[in-house]
Amino acid sequence: MIILLKKLVRYKCFALYSMETIHRIMLLIENLVTDHRGALGGISSLYEVCESLLRQIRGGDTSEVNILLSSEVLEFFQRESTWLYNNERLLHITFYTFASLIRDHSEPRFEALKTKEIKFCRFIFDNHYNSFFKIGRDLIRLLKDNLIVPEFSYVINAIPDDVKATLMKQRTLVYCLSSRLTYDMNERLTHMLEQHSISAYKRKFDFFKTNFLSTEPRYLIADIIRWVIAAYRSNNEKAMNNRYILINFLLHEIGNNWEAIELAKMALVYDWLCFDRNCKDPNVTREGLYCIEPCIQLIVDNVKSNSLRIAKDLIETLHSSINIFPGFENEIRENVRAASQVAISYNIMTVEDIKTIRTKLSEFAGDTRIVKIVGDLWGHLMNAPPPSSSLPYLANPSQPIVMQIPSATNIQMPHQDVNQRFPASLSLPQTPQNLVQPNPLFTPSHDKPPEVADLTGPKPGTNFQNLDNQTLPTKRRDSIPFSDQPSNVPVAQVTKSHETKSIVEETSSTTRIIVPSPSNSVPVPASLWLYSNHLKNFKVASLSSNSVDETQYLRQVLGLFLNVICSRFTILIFIRIFSLLRYFLNIRV
């Protein structure tokens, strides 16, 4: 019964259920909870059913069916609060869901439902104060997004400053970020990122918008952006690099709702403020780079394509967000500078990009204010004074990813890191801090075979105190390298045919690795005489796995096949006609 109920709740067309169907599902779940209170296995499965039910509450959807579902689930958890407390994961998702839905129910007709949601969130938060700090840094963001609500304003003001600082360093639990996306929405976004080329993104996003953003999305956009940045992880480097394109489409769908725009921009720059510059775990540092990479790419590429409004707004939001916590301005400013410094060392952004941003935005704004903002954020990288804080050497430890978080007063907040992307299998020795690290890895090339690095001997480390004295890279990298540190092994670069194109062309094309054809072509065998007109020679052709020309290549193969088939059928038709003529001639004779 519970297995069938789970399939029923996770059905991708759940939004098409009628109000009567939803009411019967809730009645069945309530009866199962009442009958299986003592059965551990049954309760565990019911927790999963309730978690799936929470994910089916669509953000930004104020239709009658969705409001009924939200109201029914809320009343169920109010009655079964004791049962809810037995599962910490479901407790986190419940609070995160209803705290996010409060923003969508701001209309006067939803005032009663909004009041119930506020009271319920405050009630479970007060009863399990310590448990909710395991959610991570997005708990602070969620509370600040609802500062207009007095209950939430009181909660965030009551949290001690040292606990806030500790929470900012803790990664948000992935299942909390994923809980704001329905199953079909999650599947569509993942499929678009991993299975399609850049040229198909616009068409696929239009389909996604029609199905999931047809109603006024408003605050749902911020939740999707947080999922793309902090929760979505894939071994597909192409999908990870193209996240900023999806975010760019999402930003253009917000409309003129200034509050939703501010929430979306804060969702983009939030991880800059939380970058842990004192952490010595390179896996945590790399995770921080994954979180800030889409924002950097969005700023740089919009500046290069002369879409300066988005880049200007993001930089101003990043600068103004430094004052998000009174008394921690210097700490957060150093986090932003350290994140930029590490991004340059991994070639996500270059000094030339910063100079281009400053020049173009100053011309666009027509004043010197944006120049002062860029100078405050990244001036230490352009003017080359020594940084005020030292960043750790990025080495790959043998232990798994574990966030090192200082314990707050009377509050335990262990980090639960999930979706580890790279195994820590290679252990490199620590090196003296007085050595200077050369430029990081660039894209590999086929001009000459790369040299094999000798990992047995010591390697120079990255001395961030002397980072500004190094020759910083002027070319952006395509992805965060798999290695834990930039290598000093000379690696050639792939010759890209679109290097001189604009950024608009760059986002609509990908690199194609061209393998030259051999000088000695192979003639067509005699047994294939029929195809000699179409296949004069067999030649070697190679297409890279990430090329958008695969569709065109398949069309050419299909066209060749059809031409051959048509030619063969033409010959057969002529033979048949000739046979019929001979037959009639013989009969006539």
Image (cartoon, rainbow, N blue to C red):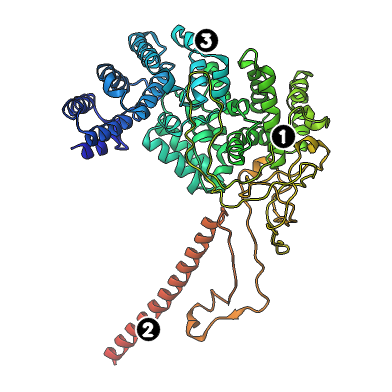
> Which amino acid, mark 3?
Asn
Q: Looking at the image, is mark 1 or mark 2 nearer the viewer? A: 1
How many numbered discs? Answer: 3
* Residue 390 left/right relative to 137: right
Whole-percent x and y of residue 370? 74, 21
Q: Quadrant of the C terminus?
A: bottom left
The numbered mark at residue 157 is 3
* Residue 103 left/right relative to 585: right
Cα gap from disc 3 to disc 2, whole angstroms: 95 Å
Q: Is residue 70 above or below residue 437?
A: above
- Point out the tag, 3 or 2, that comes first from the N-terminus: 3
Cα gap from disc 1 to disc 2, whole angstroms: 80 Å
Whole-percent x and y of residue 20? 20, 25
Whole-percent x and y of residue 567? 45, 74
> Which amino acid, mark 2?
Phe
Q: Is residue 142 above or below residue 544?
A: above
* Residue 408 or residue 324, whichever sits in front: 408
How dense is the environment of label 1, judged by Cα within 10 Å: few (below 14), some, or many (20 and up)? many
Q: Looking at the image, is mark 3 or mark 1 nearer the viewer? A: 3
Is residue 199 visible in the rendered image? The answer is no
* Residue 125 or residue 495, whichever sits in front: 125
Q: Is residue 27 above or below residue 102?
A: below
Q: Looking at the image, is mark 3 or mark 2 nearer the viewer? A: 3
> Which amino acid, mark 1?
Gln
Q: Secondary structure at mark 3?
A: helix
